[in-house]
Amino acid sequence: MAASLDPANVGAVFKAYDVRGTVPDQVDDDLARATGRAFVRVLGADKIVIGHDMRSSSPALARAYAEGANEAGADVVMIGLCSTDQLYFASGHLGLPGVMFTASHNPARYNGIKQCRAFAAPVGMETGLAEIRDLVLDGAPLEREGSGTIGEQDTLDAYVDHLLGLAPVSGRRLKVVVDAGNGMAGHTAPAVFAKLPGVDLVPMYFDLDGTFPNHEANPIEPENLVDLQAKVRETGADVGLAFDGDADRCFLVDEGGELVSPSTLTALIAARELAKAPGSAVIHNLITSRAVPEVVREHGGTPVRTRVGHSFIKATMAETDAVFGGEHSGHFYFRDFWRADSGMLAALHALAALAEADVPLSQLLAPYARYPLSGEINSTVADQQAVLGEIERTYGDRTGVSLDRLDGLTVSTLDWSFNVRASNTEPLLRLNVEGRDTPTMEHVRDEVLAIIRKDT
């Protein structure tokens, strides 16, 4: 048996939403081939579409997966290099289950498999991934005889046209800096911006390089945005855009080089989408700013709160027919994009709003940026549940405090709130704090961190 198919390894690399691990000890051709067979069997698929990112291991892994799918009797459409949201587009556009080889923002030694049903419907542990894992553990036995075919199709132009149809950009001329982080935005952004004649593009790190030579392709970490901030100030740009490795997440920097909270962008896009679909529901996870539900209500929509994670967001969007959903991590979901997340579509909404306005981005966003946020603060903690219990005891009896256990522990008052969640994969607690003003936020942040880190 290949080491990658050892039960302990299979259990380790099959995560809540995807398959992910280091290459080649955890993720290799054998694992990809077995997963391809299992995916086709669990979904009963006759045809699937596969794409991959720029990591050196991705093409071979995608080919092995396609061969496994063939062995199970399914035909395969290979779309080659693509962003994750381009793969979701292909799944929706072609009406096929989709598979993306990427490890997103993880370091170069990692790779992984994101899988979805036709029309970009999610595959997570509760929606098929557990069954796929179990079949891999069982050797992914074949259910059908015969083999499928492997063909190729280019979907980039159709993807670009679809996005620009959803968020056309017109109005005043803009200068836009885009930091692709040597990831897949270096593939999609040139195609998108080539069809935006009113935008002057300043590219950064567009060379596709899975070793990430300039900085990690993870824009949720402020240190990875320093180069973009400097370039925006240096060039006098109107806005800066930063994408993660597979380009399904997008972060903004305003004209002064200041970071824009994803909650603020969520609120802006929510207002735009509600203008097109009045009265609709808008999804936000429990870590987004309280400004988001406020803005949704002010624009006649219904805010719906959910747990962190794309499978929860997508499921709740389907249940409520929500027009849009946003997360603090820079994921943005659109009903008219098969409820899938697209960093590029979120970026186009921001550019469209800015081009239509006669004020700089900071002023455009001011009505949506209402409360100071700490951002996500991670702490290494040996006994996560013990610390969560101590936090609950500390705050539970205070007057005016409410507790919520939808996802981790959320503690709220009229003036501030915070959420503490345990990581699923690491011995970490993740803290997010919001306050009515900066001193309040900082006081609560420091008080909670003192509890979390007192034994470290």
Image (cartoon, rainbow, N blue to C red):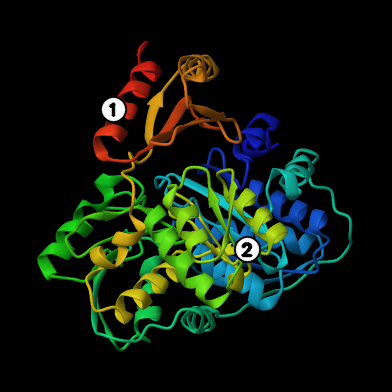
Quarter-of-image position of residue 338: bottom right
- Report crowding for label 1: few under 14, some 14 to 19, many 20 or more residues within 10 A (C-alpha): few
**Residue 360: image location, x then y, percent:** 22, 70
Query: Whole-Å distance between the Cαs marked 2 and 1?
Result: 36 Å
- State the residue in front, 303 or 175: 303
> Would residue 201 be seen by someone viewing this image from the given angle?
yes
Quadrant where the N terminus is found in the figure: top right
**Residue 349: image location, x then y, percent:** 41, 72
What's under tag 2, amino acid-wise? Ala
Say whether disc 2 or disc 1 marks the residue closer to the N-terminus.
2
Task: Name the side, left or right, on which 211 lies relative to 74.
Answer: left
Q: How many numbered circles does the render carry? A: 2
Q: Residue at x 51, y 14 (%)?
A: 393
Residue 344's place in the image compared with 10, above or below, is below
- Report crowding for label 2: few under 14, some 14 to 19, many 20 or more residues within 10 A (C-alpha): many
Q: Residue at x 53, y 81 (%)?
A: 162
- Disc 2 vs disc 1: Cβ atoms closer than 8 Å? no
Quadrant where the C terminus is found in the figure: top left
Farthest residue toward the right?
Answer: 144
- State the residue in front, 91 or 250: 250
Q: Residue at x 39, y 35 (%)?
A: 416
Regarding mark 2 in the picture, which secondary structure is present there? loop
What's under tag 1, amino acid-wise? His
List the residue tagged with mark 1.
443
Task: Name the side, left or right, on which 44 lies relative to 271.
Answer: right
Regarding mark 1 in the picture, which secondary structure is present there? helix
- State the residue in front, 28 or 196: 196
Tell me, for residue 301, which label it has, or none.
none
**Residue 238: image location, x then y, percent:** 21, 71
List the residue tagged with mark 2.
322
